[in-house]
Image (spheres, rainbow, N blue to C red):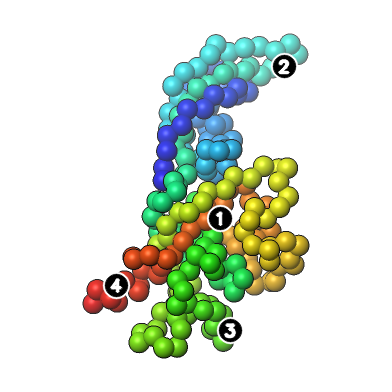
Amino acid sequence: MFISLQVIDTVRVPPSSQTRYLESKLLEILTASFCGRVLANCGICLLIERITNLSEQRIVHNDCNTYVTVCFSIIAFRPYIGEIFTAFLVSQHPMHGLALSTGFCDTIIVPPSNLPEYLMWNNERQGFTNLPDFESELDFELGGEIKIKVVDVIFRTNEDTTSMGLGNALEGEELSQDLIGSWGAIVNSKSKFIVVGSCTGPGLGDVRWWREDAN
């Protein structure tokens, strides 16, 4: 889920930091530039781990700043296919399924086709619940822990304009006012990084289901 990557970037250093505290200033600049950012085919940068190498400071004509080529390592979030992890439920939608968040990644989706067959949309409760012939009641709790298995990780570029196969209902749909937060970021196809999960399988779904079974 978390990987370490080597990155090289050229950083502009202001005059006040060109000698003393240079490395601290570089860490500050890199953190502001990279943390929380999606790196194409890499994942979401969460942390600048350390600076591993610095070039000499370079001067550009008619520029009071200097420029340093920095080699550094980052910690990024990129789950692998088949990985199982827990996220929190943000929203539910009858056509799009579940929207989840880890806190640092708000673009995690479980389409309806990846939910257990015994769940159906309940209009009255505005959520997925089990079929009536079940002995016990199963549903998803807003803000609750949902355990999923990763089935796809999607990276999108600025040139992408399609819904990346997340369902025909995403095409040209006007978002209702109650679809907020991470759910809106996913269904409007603006996100550059989407994790697609599944809740079908032993131990997957709302963690309360399995705690109740254990009791």
Q: CA distance from mark 2 to mark 1?
A: 40 Å
Q: Amino acid at mark 1?
A: Thr
Which mark, residue 91?
A: none
At mark 1, the secondary structure is loop
- Left or right: residue 46 compared with residue 204: right
Q: Check disc 4 and report the residue beneath it.
A: 211
At mark 4, the secondary structure is helix
Q: In terms of sequence position, does the residue under pointer 3 or pointer 2 come before the other?
A: 2
Q: Is residue 203 above or below residue 46?
A: below
* Residue nearer the viewer, 172 or 13: 172
Q: Check disc 3 and report the residue beneath it.
A: 123
Q: Check disc 2 and report the residue beneath it.
A: 63
Q: Nearer the viewer, mark 3 or mark 2?
A: 3
Percent of width and height locating residue 111: 55, 64
Percent of width and height locating residue 205: 41, 67
Percent of width and height locating residue 1: 41, 46
Q: Is disc 1 surrounded by few (<14), some (14 to 19) or many (20+) residues within 10 Å?
A: many
Q: In terms of sequence position, does the residue under pointer 4 or pointer 2 come before the other?
A: 2
Q: Amino acid at mark 2?
A: Asp
